[in-house]
Amino acid sequence: MIFRIPSIDRKTGEIAYFEFPAIAILELTIGDVRRKFVVHEGKGSQIDQTVLSDFKSGFGIKPFEPFIVEMLALGVAGADDMHKVGQYIIDRLVSTVGADVLLDKMNSRPVVNFEN
């Protein structure tokens, strides 16, 4: 599956899209809302990193690898358990900014990926 991430072209100001193959699709919980996220290669300054992004809007959350290392060190998840790592990232972000703020940020972006 190809995942599209919107970006603004700095020269023209128009929306441009980066396309990446999805490594995994995860269904994670923000507060009491279930959202689909995709694990994919990074873009821009995150090249050569794996990133967790909202499926519909492409809103990037965090590079994935540091959390995998942290969870392995804590003994919370195995290296192949992307769902636990993804939910851990979301839970840490929600504890910092709140579920409503995070959902508002994702919902304020245009929908660029549609479910089939």
Image: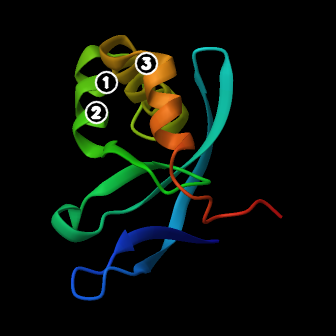
Q: How far separated are the C-alphas under marks 2 and 3?
A: 12 Å
Q: Nearer the viewer, mark 2 or mark 1?
A: 2
Residue at 60% in and 65% down: 112
Please state which of residues 87 and 110 is positioned toward the viewer in this rendering.
Answer: 110
Q: How far separated are the C-alphas under marks 2 and 1?
A: 6 Å
Neighbour tally class for label 1: few under 14, some 14-19, many 20 plus, Cα within 10 Å: some
Residue underneath mark 1 = 71
| Secondary element at tag 3 | helix
- Mark 2 or mark 3: name the one nearer the start of the chain: 2
Q: Is label 2 in contact with label 1 (beta carbons under 8 Å)? A: yes
Residue underneath mark 2 = 67
Q: Nearer the viewer, mark 1 or mark 3?
A: 3
Q: Residue 64: percent from the left, percent from the top?
A: 32, 44
Q: Where does the C terminus fall, quadrant-wise?
A: bottom right
Residue underneath mark 3 = 91
Colour mapping: rainbow
The label number, if any, that marks residue 30 in the structure image:
none
Q: Which quadrant would residue 113 be assigned to in this image?
A: bottom right
Left or right of residue 24, residue 71 in this image: left
| Residue type, mark 2 in image | Phe
Residue at 16% in and 64% down: 45
- Mark 1 or mark 3: name the one nearer the start of the chain: 1
Vertical placement of 109 versus 68: above or below?
below
| Residue type, mark 3 in image | Asp
Q: Which quadrant would residue 16 be assigned to in this image?
A: bottom left
